[in-house]
Structures are given as C-alpha cells and as structure tokens.
Amino acid sequence: MTTATTTKTKAKPALKASGGKTRLLKELIPRLPETFNDYHEICLGSGALFFALYQKLEARGAAAYLSDLNLNLITTYKEISKMSDEFRGKLESFAEHHKADPVGYFNEIRAYDRDSHWSDASDATIASWYLYLNKVVHSGMHRVNSDGFFNVPLAKDGPKGNKYPRKEFKWQPENLELVSQALRGKVYLESVSCFDALENAKPGDFVFIDPPYADKAGDCFVEYLASGFTFDDQRLLRDAYAAAAKRGVWLMMSNHADCAELYSDFNVEEVDGLRGMGYKGKAGMVTEIFVRNYGY
Ligand SMILES: C[S@@+](CC[C@H](N)C(=O)[O-])C[C@H]1O[C@@H](n2cnc3c(N)ncnc32)[C@H](O)[C@@H]1O
C-alpha cells in the first residue's frame, strides 16, 4: 500500500452555508457525548460537524443520517456522492463559461429555477446549478423570494472601492472527490423537516441540530426556504427535542440566546459567536446557546 492510500486526506464541506458551524467546531467537539450509536445531523447546511467527525464515525461503523428541508441541497449532496460524468461535465462547463462572462453567465444560470421546464431538470443539472450558485455568491448565502426562486446576487471580490464581480467558479474537484467518498457507505441523506427528522432518532443515537436562528423580534436571517422559520417553529422544535430526550436520544443543539427560556429543563450554555449573515444580511455578534440533555 502506498503512503497516498494510507494517509487519508480529510474532506472539507463542499458547500458554504450562512450560519455554518466551522468556526464553532472547537466548542462543539469537546461537548459531544462520550459514546453514542448512530449520528444524526439535522438542518445540515454545509454539514460542518459531520465533516469534522466522519472518519471517526466510519471507523466505529456508525451510520450517519443527514437531513435538511432544502431539497436542492440534499439533491446536490446525493449527486456529489455519485459524482457522475454528467455532473462533472456540467461543473467543468460552468467554470469555463463563467470565466468568459461572469455577470452575463451568472444571470443566465441563476434564472434556471424560473424556467417552466425546471421541474423536469435532471438531478445532475439541479446539483451543478446549486453548487455553482453556492460558490459564486457571497459566503454561500442561500435565500429565496416569496415564490421560492433563488435571489442572491453575484459576489464581489477585491479591495474596498475597487471591487469586481467574482471572476471564477472554483468547484474544487479534489475536495469534491473526497466529499464523494465521505458520503458513500453508511450515510443516509434525506430532505425532511427538523421535526420529522428528530422522530427518526433511536435511543442511544446522537443528534446535532442547528436550526435557523429565529429570534423573538424576528431580526435574524431565516429565509433559507420560502417557508422561513418562526419563533413558533422554535416552540415545535423544543417539543420534538424534549420527546427525543425522553426516548433516550443524546441531543446537542446550537441556537439563538432568545431560545434559552424554552430549554429551562436542559443544560444550556452561552457562547459568544460571530454569526455570518446573522442579522438580515449583516454579519454581527450573536449570543448563541448550546443546549444538551447531558453533561450537566
Ligand atoms: C444554520 S443553517 C445550518 C448550518 C450548518 N450547521 C452548517 O454547519 O453549515 C440552517 C439550515 O436549516 C435548514 N432548514 C430551514 N428550515 C428547516 C426545517 N424546517 N427543517 C429542516 N431544515 C431546515 C436550512 O435549509 C439550512 O440549511
């Protein structure tokens, strides 16, 4: 066996997500339960915690159940796991065309979901469209208008006062190959709401939940999907969390500090974190909480 096959390079998240948890991994990892059976990540986004843990899960033979209500996001992960020639060819073509005319090409591709034939698009088309937009908009922002159409503008790069439209679509083929390998095996991807996903967790499993940060005043960015996420949804999520805890599931959730009052029966800790795009498009400091049903 060569060194290249024995030293496995780790996959990094293939997508960026507003509110992604990469910057909080150093806080989250020490707070995992000591032992658990299968792993669940709900409201997956970029899946920062899964990609930090997947090699250890594989080594233990634990299954990973990854879910998000955003069907396009889940379709993209499924296509990355298959890495078909059709998908790869589309990504190569998008990169070439974008370089030739960044603004014109971005406007053309972004409008795909407004086309009346979009519902017939192949999964490879949907996934390449989603990955392209994720990489050429600011911080992978995902926002849709009230009709459910993607409406984030092309990112601008360069120094203040001399900014230019993002010139390249960097799809990082080597990392995508590693992500593809990470998603094969005992990894199950599903487009499902956080409420339903919680019901699937069995006693002894561990669930990480990172919902949209719906606060009481309605100031936080929650428009990932046309359905949004309200403080009433936070109450429903608390009920699903409490029911899973009662069944013997290990749970860790990150959330907005406004939700602390909903979890007074659990282990709530405050963490100061910069949440990118936290407040209606402006990055700002948000006091976040971690809620666990263990580690008291
Ligand atoms: C804060 S982001 C998750 C970020 C992720 N932890 C990461 O590290 O990138 C919230 C995610 O919740 C998803 N979402 C929104 N409403 C949902 C719902 N009702 N059920 C499940 N997922 C939902 C969004 O599509 C988005 O991907």
Image: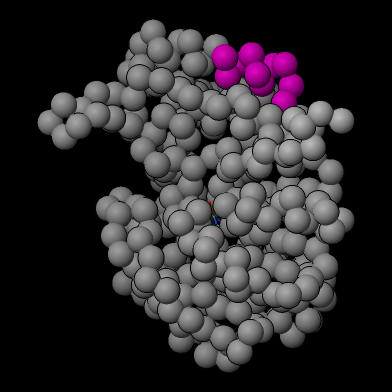
| Residue 88 forms part of the magenta stretch | yes
What residue is at 79 percent from the left and 71 percent from the top?
36
Residue at image point 36% right, 53% down: 276
Q: Quadrant of ligand 1?
A: bottom right
Is residue 69 part of the magenta span, yes or no?
no
Q: Residue at x 60, y 79 (%)?
A: 292
178 shown above or below 218: above
Residue 252 sits above or below residue 186 on the image = below
Res. 80 visible in picture: no
Q: Which of the 4 quarters of the picture holds residue 267?
A: bottom right
Of all residues, the one furthest to the left in this rendering is: 161
Q: Is residue 261 visible?
A: yes
The spot of residue 279 in percent (x, y) is 31, 59
User: Where in the figure is residue 149, as x and y percent of width and height?
Assistant: 45, 36
Observer-nearest residue: 146 or 24? 24
Q: How is the image coloured?
A: one colour
Magenta range: 83-92
Instruction: State whether residue 259 is above or below residue 131.
Output: below
